[in-house]
Amino acid sequence: DTGVSQDPRHKITKRGQNVTFRCDPISEHNRLYWYRQTLGQGPEFLTYFQNEAQLEKSRLLSDRFSAERPKGSFSTLEIQRTEQGDSAMYLCASSSYQTGADEAFFGQGTRLTVV
Amino acid sequence: SQQGEEDPQALSIQEGENATMNCSYKTSINNLQWYRQNSGRGLVHLILIRSNEREKHSGRLRVTLDTSKKSSSLLITASRAADTASYFCAIGGTGRRALTFGSGTRLQVQP
């Protein structure tokens, strides 16, 4: 257990539905990342927050995707009008600016299946 | 696109043998990190090597970095069945905070 928790662990949804995932980072970490991982591939970067500011977004993050981090604590990732191609593992990670450490601590992920 | 490319894609060895996996990348880096992932689980950080370092050790792990060749290697010595997992290199690029991952090496250690 790295201290980063994600909820839910699994989500099955019908195509066209909206889904929302939550990530609770390690409490003293001010950096939070979302990644997406498909089977047999490495994680692909989606977006990055420093405190509550969303500082970087990947081109993978289409307009159907939105992420928030109110008050710089937990974060949510919402996918609207889900498509079968959205099926993947969604990983959240956090790291700390203050310590200057660059290592990221990952949660166990949310596995999304769109049927 | 994934900047780091691991080689080999899959590796099967006997318990007690050493496992070596390589990572190549294309752009300048701030640091390079190695992560491990058990099937269906999150990633666990193993070791970080900065661009001005050439070699680093952590327990049974040894990482080397050759910035002139834009490559890194991860050596796991005296492997155990519990080392069975996927191993990913992750590039900490200059000017970016997010990591760029390779496609991973799937290691199988036979007991």
Image (cartoon, rainbow, N blue to C red):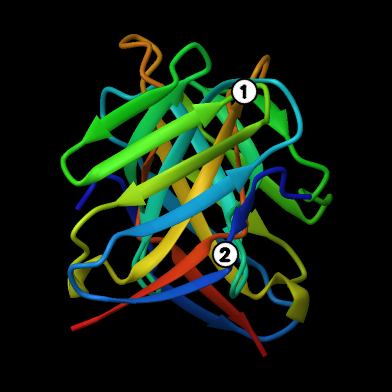
Q: Position of residue A58 (x, y in %)?
A: 76, 40
User: Is the residue under label 2 in contact with that under label 1 (CB below 8 Å)?
Assistant: no
User: Along the polypeptide, which appears first: circle 1 or circle 2?
Assistant: 2
Which percent across, then down, holds residue B13? 34, 75
Q: Residues within 10 Å of mark 1 (few under 14, many from 20)?
A: some
> Can you identify the residue that label 1 sits on?
B67
Residue at x 53%, y 37% (from the top left corner): B72
Task: Give the secondary structure at mark 2.
Answer: loop
Taking the image as shown, residue A68 lies to the left or right of residue B73, namely right
Q: Which mark is residue B8?
A: 2
Can residue A83 be spotted in the picture?
no
| Up-down relation of residue A75 to residue A91 (above or below) | above
Q: Quadrant of residue B46?
A: top left
Q: Residue at x 69, y 46 (%)?
A: A66
Instruction: Mark 2: give few (<14), some (14-19) or many (20+) Cα within 10 Å.
Output: some
Q: Amino acid at mark 2?
A: Pro
Q: Is residue A85 above or below residue B104?
A: below
Displayed quadrant of residue A93? top left
Image point (47%, 55%), residue name? B21
Q: Nearer the viewer, residue B88 or A107?
A: B88
Of residues B47 and A78, the one drawn nearer to the viewer in this rendering? B47
User: Residue at coordinates 59% horizontally, 55% vertically from top-left?
Assistant: B6
Mark 1 lies on a secondary structure that is loop
The chain identifier of the residue carrying mark 1 reads B
Q: Amino acid at mark 1?
A: Thr
The verdict on a common chain for dots 1 and 2 is: yes
Whether residue A29 sits left or right of residue B96 in the image: it is left
